[in-house]
Image (spheres, grey):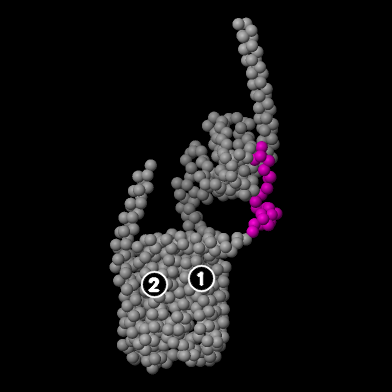
Amino acid sequence: MNSEEGFTENRILKNTDETKITEDGHKKRISYSSTVLRQDSNANEKQWPVKKEVKEKEEEDAATEMVPPDGGWGWMVALGSFVIMTLIPMVSPCFGVLFSRYLMEQGASSTTTAWIFNSQCCIWNLMAIITRPVTKEFGWRKIGIFGAALAAVSFVISAFAPCPEFLFFSFSLLCGVGGGMVVSICFLIVPIYFDRRRGVATAIMMAGVCLGQMLGPPIARFLQDEYGFRGATLMVGGIILNGCLGASFFHPVEQHMKKGQPQAGNQPLAGEAPLLPPEPSTLGSRSRELVKCHSELSLTDSTGDPDFDLMRIAVRSRMMKSRAGRHLSDASTISISRNNSSLCISTLDVAGIIAMPDTDQNDPSNLDSDDSKKTLPSICSVVFRVFQSTVADMGILRSPRACIIALSGTFGINGYLNFMMMVPFAMQAAGQTLEDSAYCISISALCNLLMRLLVATLSDWPRFNKRLVYVSGYFTVSLSILVFPFLTELPWLMAAMALFGCGVGANMGLYTLVMIDVMGLDNLPPVFGASCFMVAMGFIILGPIIGIIRDSTNSYSLSIWVVAGMLLTSFMLWIFMPAAIRYDERKMKEREEKEKSKP
């Protein structure tokens, strides 16, 4: 019995000695770590007030909502869009004036002419689908300058076309790609820069379209009379090249955002401990995410233990000064608790965090070393991302509202552009001169300009019904086209073209604004891209049919009446818009109820 008690006592003493040794070693490690932490804290003591001020400023910025400038540099963007829309879209009304004599001399059929024009319009509108993904990869300004330059080059090459079929490459392909990109950018970037003054900015941009339609045909006719087909086409290409100047104003909107009203919801509650973000994130030097998300480092108020507080301060300091690229999410999380305080870090231990190099991301030498390690994304990866984003944007067509907008735009834009293309041919076939047709197109452009300015300006008025005026434009255009073949005298033809211009101005002046009104600003890029895709398909399907009808009947009148029917179809489609809105609202409510019912 005594031997058993002695054995037990010796065992207890042995365990006690081991415990003391362990505690002594632990205390030594804590003492060593505390010494290192004190040294690091003293070294950064002078910088800490500055960091605190930076943190407070960043937290204040995080609580403030950034809003579009609604002016400022936005007016320069509107001016650049005005320049581009004056020079680039005028190729459509100038097509008949520039190429009619050449195509007639070469004996091109109406079907070939329709294919050349509609192929260009198809590619032009297809570019709107990929414009947003491409600008996300390369930026607004680069793509805008590239598009304007390519459109100018297309006319220079077209001046040396050996046959009408060559225009499929020089005009349809090159001008379609370049012009479609830069014009789509104008439609997308102007609404982003403005809020209350969006209508005025859109009016400025749309005024360029009308000014180009008004000045383009007479200038093209004058140049042809003076310098012939080749000289006129070369000069038009030089004029279009000035669109690069307008695209140079397209800065990213993030560079010009201004502070709005503070949002109280962004401020953390008093005494609330910051939380780790649910997604993996990267620590960077003085990163905004460290402040806005309250960092991957979660620290509460002082614990009362100087050693533990020093460790918290040093860890925070080193983490804020660590180089970007250290991923906390790549390792599991360790939690160190002390009273009500917590320190959450990755499997990088405390000594490892303290040993992080004291580097600054803003140091040019560091930037150079980072840039040397970066490689340009491969073409395949860029194409894949563009394709992926394009497919995602096309998903907006699941909404009946988006389908109505896209289909009505398909019939409407196809109709009025094909009508303008046929006007010079139809008037010359009826005995009028090319000069008369140029004046008719200019009169329609003048009325188009005045109406666009009027409706775009009135759109900022709360009682102005955008949808009603937009739909009325379809009806007015269809009516003017319907009566055009019955008119033989030039004054009446000019009156019909003036009515046509008013209808187009009322409709196209509100084109993007109605998209925003029906679908919302966030859905503008996908709706615009999907609509342009539908319009492009319409040019391939509907456009050549108009040329085939002309060749089969040897009459422009029947082709023009088919175009009038297309515009009337656009008008009829909008009758179903209220039902489409109710359908989408019902689907949204059902989706919300399903989400609420989920445990």
- One can see residue 443 in this view: no
Closer to the camera in the image, 292 or 395? 395
Rendered residue at 53%/61% (across/down): 384
Identify residue type, mark 1: Met
* Tag of residue 4: none
* Residue at mark 2: 410
Rendered residue at 35%/79% (across/down): 563
* Residue at the outermost bottom position: 431
Closer to the camera in the image, 428 or 202? 428
Q: Quadrant of residue 566?
A: bottom left
Rendered residue at 50%/80% (across/down): 168
Tell me the element at label 1.
Answer: helix
Closer to the camera in the image, 528 or 33? 528
Task: Name the spot of residue 243 as percent of width and height, x first.
Answer: 54, 75
- Look at the picture and state if 69 lies above or below 409: above
- Which region is colored magenta? 351-375
Q: Residues within 10 Å of mark 1 (few under 14, many from 20)?
A: many
The reply to whether discs 1 and 2 touch (Cβ–Cβ < 8 Å) is no
Task: Name the spot of residue 575 as percent of width and height, x first.
Answer: 29, 68
* Residue at mark 1: 181
Task: Name the spot of residue 538 as percent of width and height, x first.
Answer: 40, 74
Quadrant the C terminus occupies: top left
Q: Quadrant of residue 46?
A: top right
